[in-house]
Image (tube, grey):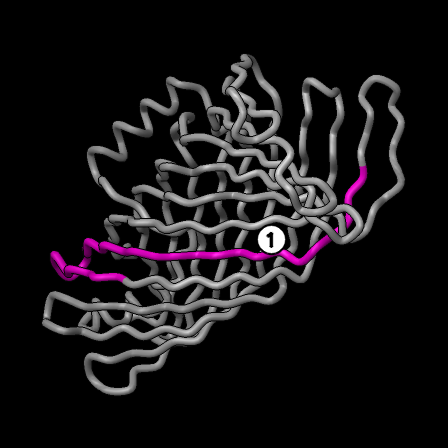
Amino acid sequence: MHFAMRNILLLLCNGILLLTSVPCRADHAVSAQSVHPDEQQSPFKSSISLQGGLLTGTASEYVFSGGNKTSQLDWGLNPVVLVGLTINTQFFKMFFLNLGYWTGLNEDIGSVEDADYTSFGIPSLYSKQDSILERAHFFDLNAGYAYRIFDGLSVAGLIGYHLINLKMTARDGYLEYPPGSMPQPFYGTGIAVEQTYQIAYVGIGATYEIHSVLYVQLFPMYSPLVHCQQKDYHFRRQLDVFSSMSSGHYASLTASLGWKVNQGTSIVLSGAYASIAMAKGESYNVDLRSGAISPTASNSASAGFHATTVMLSVDHLLTWQ
């Protein structure tokens, strides 16, 4: 994203919002029914939510050889400024369909730490560089059923699909060889990584109105079906590494506090934690100088992601004539 566009989005974000949360906004599943109970006249209604905030966490990648970990990179996400929107639709007061998209705005997101190990697990090399965010995209689609247990309390069940795409570059820093020795500075771009997580998940949730204008929500979500594609670009070695992992686990928990400003508008403050742990997968290398492709190695790569987010959103109920 060009700086001009980023500045425009930052101005928009600062004018409406200030804080942010997880890219997955399943908490909208029962918000329309719970926050606007007096307006449930039409079998179809929708709302739009403008959101912005901060995400902090780590994206990790692991390399294995002979069953032993030989390398680990931890990419800091401290923080990522996010803006986005969701469109939330409700049918017959019970069924809902939500669609959301979020993107990162800033480039400087902390540092990346790279540690290599011998086959005996002894640290052999350590480096630390600046972490530059090239892009961060989050997409979510979920649908489900909401049921009002009694006046003021609603519960919901949902299924969804979540996509996370991150690309970071390591620039400038220092190297310790062996670890603990005198740091040796180096400059330029050393490595970049792109991770794409695809998550099919299930979730449950509840919304409780604690006052006529205040409500709280809690939504846990889980998936044992996470797939990850990872690309590593080793610029100095002119080597690209492609990895594929399946059967990962995803878990998240979102808690929200909403204030009904009027019958059509609410302000929601949310906090969330999300974690992804991937099983070992396969990988292969491409030598950019010769074009040679290595044999595919099984159980040679893994990845992980965890993040805490805080978000402030403005939800507006759309009216149709």
In the rendered image, the quadrant that contains the C terminus is: bottom left
Answer left or right for 20 relative to 76. Answer: left
- In percent of width and height, residue 106 lies at 38, 28
When asked about the image quadrant of residue 32, the answer is: bottom left
* Label 1 Cα crowd, 10 Å radius (few <14 / some 14-19 / many 20+): some
When asked about the image quadrant of residue 99, the answer is: bottom left
The amino acid sitting under disc 1 is Gln
Q: Which residues are magenta?
A: 256-284
- Taken as a whole, is the magenta stretch helix, strand or loop? strand
Instruction: Name the outermost residue toward the front.
Output: 181
The answer to whether one can see residue 13 in this image is yes
Please report the residue visible at 19 percent of the width from the left and 53 percent of the height from the top. 267
Residue at which label 1 appears: 198
Please report the residue visible at 57 percent of the width from the left and 62 percent of the height from the top. 249
Work out whether 279 lies above or below 53.
below
Q: Is residue 93 magenta?
A: no
Please report the residue visible at 48 percent of the width from the left and 45 percent of the height from the top. 138
